[in-house]
Image (tube, rainbow, N blue to C red):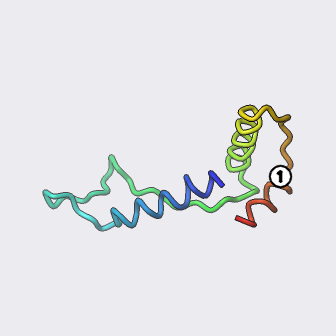
Amino acid sequence: MQFKRFFTKMIQRLLQLNPIDSKNSDGSPFWSADKRPPTVLDIDYTNKNHVMFLQSCSKLAGDVFGMKFTFDIEKARKAAEQV
């Protein structure tokens, strides 16, 4: 699932490579005011932005493969839980 890839796994990997307390070669903090550390997100089906992301991905995939777009939040939730 793209949401999990973009907002959970990639962020976890980034934080593994550059932990919150990591330093640059000059000793300054890697994460600073201009470059704040990201937060790992789990999908929340009550969050309008998360649902809109799922809808957009579904529509895009449908368009690419010539499929009619329909989106059912309950079906999406069940499918995501299986991933």
Name the residue nearer the viewer: 57 or 7: 57
The vertical placement of 48 against 46, above or below, is: above
- Name the residue: 58% across, 60% down: 41
The residue at the far left in this view is 26
Q: Quadrant of the N terminus?
A: bottom right
- Name the residue: 38% across, 53% down: 36
Name the residue carrying label 1.
73
The quadrant in which residue 78 appears is bottom right
Q: Which amino acid does label 1 sit on?
A: Ile
Residue 25 shown left or right of residue 21 in the figure: left
SS at badge 1: helix
- Name the residue: 85% across, 34% down: 68
Residue 47 rendering spot, x and y as whole percentages: 71, 53
Residue 25 shown left or right of residue 14 in the figure: left
The quadrant in which residue 17 appears is bottom left
Could you classify mark 1 by the number of other residues whose Cα lies within 10 Å: few (under 14), some (14-19), or many (20 or more)? few
- Name the residue: 32% across, 57% down: 31
The vertical placement of 69 against 77, above or below, is: above
Query: How many labels sit on residues?
Result: 1
